[in-house]
Image (cartoon, rainbow, N blue to C red):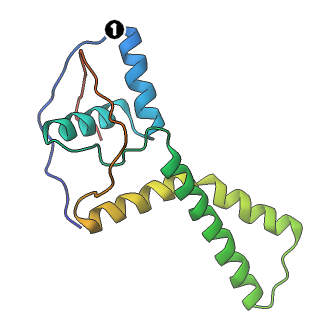
Amino acid sequence: MVKPPLRTKTLSTKVSQEEFGQLEAAASQRGLTPSEWTRETLLASVNGREPKACDPGGTGHAVMAELVALRAILLNVLFKLANGETLTEEGMQRLIDRADSDKLRKARERLLQAQESEGQRKEKCSSFFVVSGSIESRGSR
């Protein structure tokens, strides 16, 4: 896995409270911090590309999260059955709760791994958020 270059420069600007709320909401929809979202959006715009994980409604991440959780549950159930164990209602609920507790994090990790293995993202989005005015990015990650 190739590490991204070390970020040592800071880009700073001022935004109103309302603008910051808009930026924060856009970042949150994508599961990113405002700084991560800003960096990704700015760099994609400068390079004439769409943001990496462009999914304005979060639908792709939600679907991937459900698939990750379903896979975890299925594999655990099959493993228990293959070992001759019986699965109680409580045991099944524990499996579901555990799968649900970290499904979003695991989905993000798997999507990132897929992007890195492809070398570049081929997915196109039907909409692109253009932010006019000020954006702040402190390079935190």
Name the residue rendered at 67%, 60% in the picture. 98
Mark 1, secondary structure of its residue? loop
Q: Residue at x 44, y 54 (%)?
A: 108
Q: Is residue 120 left or right of residue 113?
A: left
Which residue carries the number 1 mark? 16
Q: Quadrant of the N terminus?
A: bottom left
Determine whether 91 is above or below 101 in the image: below
Instruction: Locate residue 12 relative to residue 33 in the image: left or right.
Output: left
How many numbered discs sit on the rendered protein? 1
Placement of the C terminus among the 4 image quadrants: top left
**Front-most of 140 and 119?**
119
Question: What residue do we see at 24% from left, 12% from top?
Answer: 14
The x and y percentages for residue 125 are: 35, 45
**Residue 49: x %, y % from top left:** 21, 44
| Amino acid type, callout 1 | Ser
Q: 10 Å neighbourhood of mark 1: few (<14), some, or many (≥20)?
A: few
Quarter holding residue 99: bottom right
Q: Nearer the viewer, residue 12 or 127?
A: 127
Instruction: Examine the image and state in which quarter residue 45 appears.
Output: top left
Q: Which residue is painted at 12% across and 38% down in the image? A: 8
Q: Is residue 9 left or right of residue 25?
A: left
Where residue 105 appears, as percent x and y from the top left, is: 50, 53
Q: Position of residue 37 (x, y in %)?
A: 33, 35
**Residue closest to the far front:** 126
Question: On screen, 6 above or below 109?
Answer: above
- Seen in the picture, residue 67 relative to 81 is either above or below; the reply is above
